[in-house]
Image (cartoon, rainbow, N blue to C red):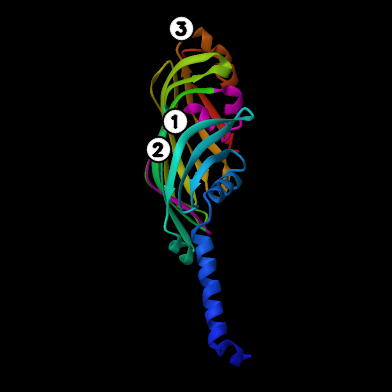
């Protein structure tokens, strides 16, 4: 058997077959990246009109909302396929549209993922596939996300991220002009500390909570809520939040399911 593999023709054939496999992997079509994204997001995100390869390409990114897909941005990505030999894929992402812009570095491996230099702005409606209640509440306004470094791997969270909800509204409750809000996430071991603050507005929400890497589908937040007494239009929303008396800060404790 060893003599068979020592034959020059056999060794050349094996080398050629290996080179052909490398060629196929390096030239995987960009549609494979779309398939992987849709599978990883459980259908919440889709990539269409793809061009290029799975390692360097472009496509149209859309988010599933109310049973339909809403276009987010024209997406571009690039990565070095040689990193896959080390069990890691490093991807540079960028995208733009009329109301959406983002750029980020992302590193994927079997144990988890990390994100670097994240800057993104998008319509608040993009969270509808993530938060089950958002599909009913219909958030309006803009989201701004920033993170220098955030890693979720091996059941642990490291780094920090900030999410701001600007010109917030909830059309599902006929609640407009709520204000601006900030959610800060700071990793520390198996949990991330969450802080909620109101930057301005007639609905003041302030609190703290946690998100655990071992329980990624639940966000715990507790704090106080207060609505301006003159905002009678906020009463349906206040009742849904468990706040009965406008103008008086009242405690809340939320367990928010994540899809």
* For residue 19, above or below residue 60: below
Q: Residue at x 52, y 15 (%)?
A: 175
Q: Which mark is residue 122?
A: 1
* For residue 234, above or below residue 58: above
In x, y percent, where is residue 215?
58, 46
**CA separation in Å, label 2 and label 1:** 8 Å
Disc 2, SS: strand
**Residue 86 or 73: which is nearer the viewer?**
73
Quadrant of the frame with the C terminus = top right
Q: Is residue 45 visible?
A: yes
**CA separation in Å, label 3 and label 2:** 38 Å
**Residue 163 sits in quarter:** top left
**Residue 146 sits in quarter:** top left
Residue bounds of the magenta highlight: 110-138
Quadrant of the frame with the N terminus = bottom right
Q: Which mark is residue 230?
A: 3
Mark 2–mark 1 contact, CB under 8 Å?
yes
Disc 1, SS: strand
Q: Residue at x 43, y 43 (%)?
A: 76
Crowd tier of the residue under label 3, counting other residues whose Cα lies within 10 Å: few below 14, some 14–19, many 20 or above:
few
Mark 1–mark 3 contact, CB under 8 Å?
no
């Amino acid at each position: 058997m060893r003599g068979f593999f020592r034959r020059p023709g056999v060794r050349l054939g094996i080398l050629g077959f290996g080179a052909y496999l490398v060629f196929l992997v390096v030239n995987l079509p960009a549609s494979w990246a779309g398939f992987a994204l849709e599978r990883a997001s459980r259908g919440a995100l889709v990539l269409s009109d793809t061009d290029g390869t799975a390692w360097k390409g472009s496509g149209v990114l859309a988010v599933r909302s109310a049973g339909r897909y809403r276009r987010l941005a024209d997406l571009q990505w690039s990565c070095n396929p040689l990193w896959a030999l080390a069990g890691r894929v490093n991807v540079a992402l960028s995208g733009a549209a009329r109301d959406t812009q983002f750029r980020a570095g992302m590193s994927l491996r079997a144990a988890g993922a990390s994100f670097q230099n994240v800057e993104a702005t998008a319509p608040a409606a993009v969270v509808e596939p993530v938060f089950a209640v958002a599909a009913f509440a219909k958030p309006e306004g803009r989201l701004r996300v920033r993170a220098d470094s955030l890693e979720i791997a091996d059941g642990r969270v490291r780094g920090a991220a900030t999410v701001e909800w600007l010109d917030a509204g909830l059309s599902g409750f006929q609640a407009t002009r709520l204000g601006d809000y900030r959610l800060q996430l700071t990793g520390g071991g198996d949990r991330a500390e969450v802080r909620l603050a109101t930057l301005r507005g007639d609905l003041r929400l302030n609190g703290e909570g946690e998100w655990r890497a071992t329980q990624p589908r639940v966000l715990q937040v507790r704090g106080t809520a207060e609505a301006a007494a003159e905002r009678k239009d906020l009463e349906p929303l206040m009742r849904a939040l468990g706040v009965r008396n406008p103008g008086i800060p009242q405690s809340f404790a939320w367990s928010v399911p994540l899809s």
